Amino acid sequence: MAGRGTRLRPHTHVTPKPLMPVVGIPMVERIVNTFIEVLPRPITEAVFILGDFPSEVNEALTAICERHGLRASFVRQDQALGTGHAIHCARDYLHGEVVTVFADTLFTMHGPASLEGTDVMAWVKHVEDPSRFGVAVMDGARIIALVEKSPKLISHEALIGIYYVRDGKELRDAIQRLMDDEITGYGDEYQLTDAFDILLKKGLVFETAGVSEWLDCGTIEAFMATCFHLLKTESAQHGSVHNSELIQPVFVAEGATVQDSTVGPNVVVEKGAVVSQSTVSNSIIFSGARVEGSDLSESMIGRHATVFGAKGRLNIGDHSSIG
């Protein structure tokens, strides 16, 4: 999670994208929850590969791990030299069973994962246009190649950035070969798919597992769409609602307040936020924000921002003030 999340700015100027709350739960914590549910053996440690983030990020990630009984460790990627290089930064932790995850998408897996008899498990999603993704080239049920962002249509099985490796040392050695021989791929960067392709050609057993949902959180529009999609099954009212109409689906977090307002459909009001004397639809109000006397739609209001007497569509970052 070393990326800067530029497509989600201004909301990621301070908060790394994987720590953005998605209907009350940080994105990375949702990923941890998924693996706790589907992996056949307990997770003992989470290693976070970070960029130049403030110490508060480590504290937040440590708190997430403590909630789930995990040990938190941290490494830093000082240069953005590719996905393979990112995992290379965590090479000291690549031993035993390892799962590598890129923490910028959410997913729902097809039940418990069966890892027996495989050296590498790659999770995939069938997509009609895989040009933006790495793909698994299949021969029946067998993977015969892993290719990063091919300009030609060679497979519909998009790699979603999640891999299980039975022996982390195998992956560490393959990435080291990329680095030693300066083998770069797409974008002239060290790609993790190229390291896995080395293991594939070495004869390791590769299998795929599907996901029923793959939800993008990488842009403002995609992030909002994912939140609204989750609202359909996770909508709940925990906060304080007074003299107001909620048009479901709506999520009002514990510690949030809605008063003298009409809220919904498709609205998330995060912890500590206040919506007063306003009409809000299809919007996300982040923690600690205050919206008063406003009529908002398709808006994202950053943490601890204040909006007074505004109308229309807003996208403002943390600690901003309008009106």
Image (tube, rainbow, N blue to C red):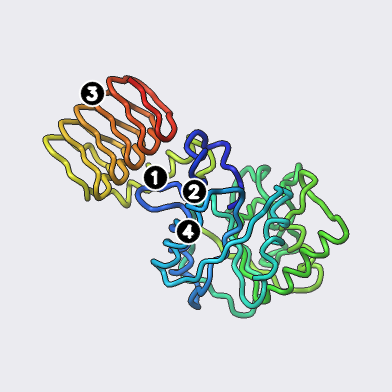
Give whichever of 288, 24 is nearer the camera. Answer: 288
Work out whether residue 182 or residue 128 is closer to the camera in this orientation and state it: 182
For badge 4, the amino acid type reads: Leu
Mark 2, residue position: 215
Look at the numbered disc 2 and give the secondary structure of its residue: strand
Q: x, y (%) of residue 22?
A: 40, 48
Type of the residue with mark 3: Gly
Q: Residues within 10 Å of mark 1 (few under 14, many from 20)?
A: some
Q: Residue at x 25, y 40 (%)?
A: 248
Q: Quadrant of the C terminus?
A: top left
- Residue drawn at point x = 33 percent, y = 29 percent: 306
Residue 213, can we see it?
no
Q: Residue at image x 47%, y 50%?
A: 19
Asked if 11 appears above or below 164 in the picture, the reply is above
Q: Secondary structure at mark 1?
A: helix
**Residue visible at 77% across and 46% down in the picture:** 186
The residues tagged by marks 4 and 2 sit, at their Cα atoms, a distance apart of: 22 Å
Q: Is residue 186 above or below residue 290?
A: below
* Residue marked by disc 3: 293
Disc 1: which residue: 229
> Which residue type does callout 2 highlight?
Leu
Question: How far from the left and from the top, in percent, is residue 284?
Answer: 36, 37
As helix, strand or loop, the secondary structure at mark 4 comes to helix
305 horizontally vs 182: left or right: left
Vertical comparison of 309 with 1: above or below: above
Marker disc for residue 317: none
Q: Measure the C-alpha gap from mark 1 to mark 3.
A: 28 Å
Q: Nearer the viewer, mark 4 or mark 2?
A: 4
Residue highlighted by disc 4: 61
Q: Earlier in the sequence, mark 3 or mark 2?
A: 2
